[in-house]
Amino acid sequence: MNNLVRLQAKGILEFSNIKKPSSMPLNELRALFYMLEISPGLLQPNAQDQGVAQLRIKVEEWLRKVVPLIAAIRDGIPTWEAPLLSEEAIKAGQQRLQQRYQFLQILHGYKKPAHIKICKISLEEISTQKALLEEAKKLLNLRERAVKVTQKANYIVHAMNHLPSSDPWVTQVEGALEDLYHALKAEENCEKEIEVLDQLKKEYIDHYYKLHSQVRLGATAENQKTQMLRDGRFDALRQLTSIKILPAQKLKEWQEKLDQLKVCWKLNKTELEHTPYCIHCKYRPKDEAYIQPVSLAQLDKELTDLLEEWTNTLRTTLNDPEFTESITLLTAEQQELIRQFQLKGEFDLPIDIRLVETIRELLDGIYKVEIPLHRLIEMAGDGNPLTLDELRERFERLIREEVGNRPTSRIRIMLRKE
Ligand SMILES: [Zn+2]
């Protein structure tokens, strides 16, 4: 029976001599079967059961296509740009599809040979439906093509949003997308335009991948970065920022530059086939285009230079006679730390926090307060008995009188023997 289903010239001739049974609208049914690509041989009395079954299959197939098509053309067949159909075309198309839908519904009611025998469809109606069917086929093709092309175009549009508008690739793409839209609207097959788009996508992937590897650190560079932050220079500088005369802002700027060097070595080109940007670090050349990438080697040098600069500043400052006396007011341990630093002319890494604290204290200012011995004797009553409270009170008064309002942490008291 399969052979009968096929529309072959031989078959058509073979069955064109079917005797017309009384009251059966054979011409109309034959035209209907032709239209739906069913062999008219199935109109023979002994094949009519199968003919009706084939009719139902074809009608159901068409209903499955027409129903979503009615919904799709309501939006005018959307694309990445404007919809393909104008308002009028949508209206007219919907009307005609509704007409076709109603016709299919009638055919769907034919469940037995007895039903087709009393079929009232005219040849004229079949001819109209044939035109509608051709139109529906065209719309289906257009929609299918629009979906396929839009998927490709969406990738390109998305990719465009990641590059600066000045990028030559963007200019090329704008023209290609316009050509594609016109070809689609003109119901051309768009093959040539899709080829151009595919090529542009390939170029984009290479371009993006290259930019990504220029601005992102790979695995080796990441290790170098970690190493650089752990070798003591950065920690030393961070500790030294507590000393007011050193420009802490410089270290902050250095750190900002380092933060811009993001690490990402996971991107591969296959991922870019699906998503036009790195899914791991979301790199967007448009946003980072104006940031001058600094190399890790450059930052490493800057770190060394900064530590050297700050060391020199501190060494020169501590050699200033202004501080010579202050140094003598430090504890023996502190004096030794300073002496070692002055001797070596550099910091040992990791930096000794006690040394940083000592320098900070010195530069913040240390005030020497000398108390003559006789003042102390007077305070203690000079041989007269004092209660504990009296002694405590007199001592507090002496401190107040000698020290005044100066910050107590910067005061060093020395007893002057007479
Ligand atoms: Zn990345």
Image (spheres, helix red, strand yellow):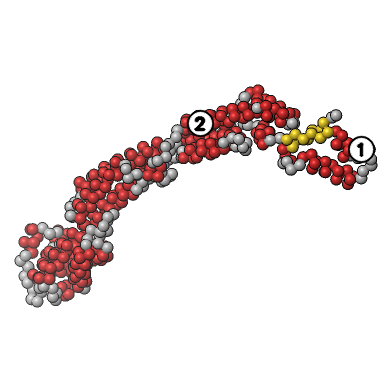
Which one is in front, 381 or 208?
A: 381
Residue 260 in the image: above or below residue 331: below
The structure residue drawn at horizontal position 12% and vertical position 71%, both measured from the top left corner, is: 125
**In this view, which residue lies farthest toward the top?**
343
**Label 2 residue SS:** helix
Kindly identify the residue that appears in the image at 87 percent across and 34 percent down. Answer: 374
- Specify the quarter for ligand 1: top left
| Figure quadrant of the C terminus | top right
Q: Compared with residue 92, is residue 173 higher up or lower down, i.e. above or below? A: above
Few, some or many residues within 10 Å of mark 2 (<14, 14–19, 20+): some
Q: Is mark 2 within 8 Å of ligand 1?
A: no
Quadrant location, the N terminus = bottom left
Q: Position of residue 151 (x, y in %)?
A: 29, 52
Q: Which mark is residue 302?
A: 2
The local crowd at label 1, few if under 14, some if 14 to 19, many if 20 or more residues have their Cα within 10 Å, is: few
Q: Position of residue 307 (x, y in %)?
A: 56, 30
Dividing the picture into quarters, in which one does residue 102 lie?
A: bottom left
- Badge 2 or badge 1: first in the primary sequence: 2
Q: Looking at the image, is mark 2 or mark 1 nearer the viewer? A: 1
- The disc label shown at residue 368, or none: none
| C-beta proximity under 8 Å, tags 2 and 1 | no
The amino acid type of the residue labelled 2 equals Glu
**Between 71 and 254, which is closer to the camera in this rendering?**
254
Q: Badge 1 is on which residue?
A: 382
Which quadrant holds residue 411?
A: top right
The residue at the point 68 percent across, 29 percent down is: 323
Q: Residue at x 82, y 41 (%)?
A: 398
Residue 53 visible in image = no
The answer to which of 303 and 227 lies nearer the viewer is: 303
